[in-house]
Image (cartoon, coloured by chain):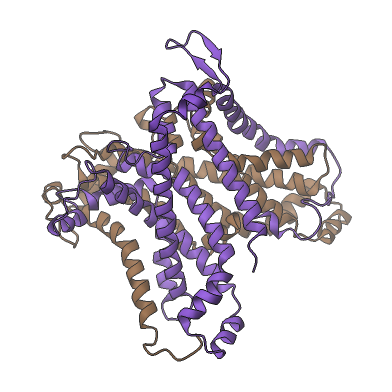
Chain colours: A brown, B purple
Amino acid sequence: MVEHRRFGNLLPHLVLLAGVAVVVFPVYLAVIASTHDNAVIANGQMPLYPGGHALETYWTTITSGTGRTTREPVGNMMLNSLVMALGIAIGKIAISIISAYAIVFFSFPFRMTTFWIIFVTLMLPVEVRIFPTYKITSDLHMLDSYSGLILPLVASATATLLFRQFFMTIPKELVEASKIDGAGPIRFFFDTLLPLSVTNIAALFVILFIYGWNQYLWPLLITTRDDMQTIVIGIKKILDVHDALTEWSVAMATAVLAMLPPVAVVILMQRLFVKGLIETEK
Amino acid sequence: MILRRHQGGGLMENRAIFSGRLLPLLLVLPQLAISLVFFYWPALQALWQSFLVQDAFGISTEFVWFENYVSLLSTPAYYHAIGVTFLFSLLVVVFSLAIGLLLAVMANRDIPGLQVYRTFLIIPYAVAPAVASAVFIFMFQPGLGMIARSLQRAGIDWNPVLNGTHAMILVVTIAVWNQISYNFLFFLAGLQSIPKSVIEAAAIDGARPMRRFWTIVFPLLSPTTFFLIIVNTTYAFFNTLGIIDTATEGGPNSATQTLVYKVFLDGKAGTDLGGSAAQSVILMIIVIGLTAFQFRYVEKKVHY
């Protein structure tokens, strides 16, 4: 950076390569395991290159699941995960953007109270109110349903705060100009604010999709039927640690399928992801 | 972190522009309704239940003030879970921050291929804790896992199912791996915001790279570091349930049973509603403390 380095950039390359190796190795191993026969894996002789069972393993995994622990097709679990992740991401964005709009652009009774009510939910993660939340969801007859999987996770202080912060940077002149053109609050929202928010919405979507897809505790609690479970909780049932007979190839194929959508989203939308991550947290 | 960006004035200056009362109320209604039904009501329920004792058949309920808390705080198992949580969080925070910082420092220079490194390094963020757990169990499974076999060849009797220390090492490793991306990206953003001129000035004064790092760069990074300590502590406390449930189920012998996992297990058993509610309330106080700390201390006491 400043002075001449004796070894050039050798050290950074070595350290970063080691970091990449640590990060990628477990994922690589899972991919390899999903292409080998269970017997080869079980005796600990799995090679580090792909085997020839990929098609058949993925086909059984997606269409029928494991033979022993759960007969639920992993394809169906993925569909449940997809519905849940999309529902949470879209739902959170929709209700957050309209509440932030109201808080920033309107004056109404209890505006500050509303803001604080939303803000304080940051301090009540699902982990600390597990069973009472379960009870309410059950009282509302939402166990084993998509609405039960999605609705309780849809309120998000983070997204509201992000939109609020962004809306406050919008110059008043823009609103005034829009008013002179005869636009009411609803037209201003759709014609001016929404187009300006596209990048923020997309960045937030990436973060929230991953958040939704990767949920564990909540789907574990409220799904009792096998056909409603998501892939992230399905994997635990496939993988029985205390059982020497775990079908490792199917378990690892399931892990790969569980990683694929969020990893693809992060890699393909890398710039939006980094923007979303830094802005929602910082 | 978000409140800081707002320049001048109070928390929210009055910039309301549109008139009308019904529309804004309708707009905040969905979020308010969900917050009240699924956040506030359950939290209040937990609080209320923590003051009640129910008999074994659930027929009679008695208000007992702080009795649930007193009996909770006199159980050795609870202190054990506190100890496990602190050890676990400490290890996760120290290792994931150290690795994230090292990688970020190495990536904070003009080297070819940086984009490729970054692409790989963000992968763990996208992997669900429970899924990361499944993959690591495969590597660390005695008898067949690649790493387990290497350890066994090296003469270590590796067995996380029976050995508590091994189980702790396993869950810490998974959590650290899971957090690498996050810490790397935030440290890198922090490093990139340090003006190059500051570092050049130190170099002209003759400070060597290591010395420059510890006396100039690291102190300038302190806001990022503090922020990450809080976020990673919160992660270790609350978001690792999937890791623990998949890898060890809190075992062996409660060696990896954190406070959150204990609430989960006790609640699932369903025998002591009051006690489990009291545990939830204590956790709530911890989250409130961490969040308040994040917003107050990190914002105000740590300056560039």
Q: Residue at x 12, y 58 (%)?
A: B153
User: Is residue A255 shown left or right of residue A56?
Assistant: right
Residue drawn at point x = 52 percent, y = 60 percent: A273
Percent x, y of residue B152: 15, 55
Could you say where residue A118 lies in the image, as x and y percent from the top left? Answer: 67, 40
Q: Is residue A206 visible?
A: no
Where residue A69 sits, quadrant-wise, is top left
Residue in the image at 11% along x and 55% along y? A45
User: Residue A160 at x, y = what percent?
Assistant: 66, 47
Q: Residue furthest right?
A: A180
Task: Identify which residue is drawn at 66% across, 38% down.
Answer: B31
Q: Nearer the viewer, residue A25 or A122?
A: A122
How far from the left and from the top, in percent, is residue A264? 42, 57
Considering every residue shown, the one lying at the far top of the view is B59
Viewer can see residue B156: yes
Viewed as shown, does residue B90 lie left or right of A169? left
Q: Is residue A171 above or below residue B79?
A: below
Vertical position of residue A156 compared to residue B53: above or below: below
**In this view, B187 is above or below B15:** below
Locate residue A46: give its quadrant. Answer: bottom left
Give the side of residue A23 with respect to residue B51, left or right. left
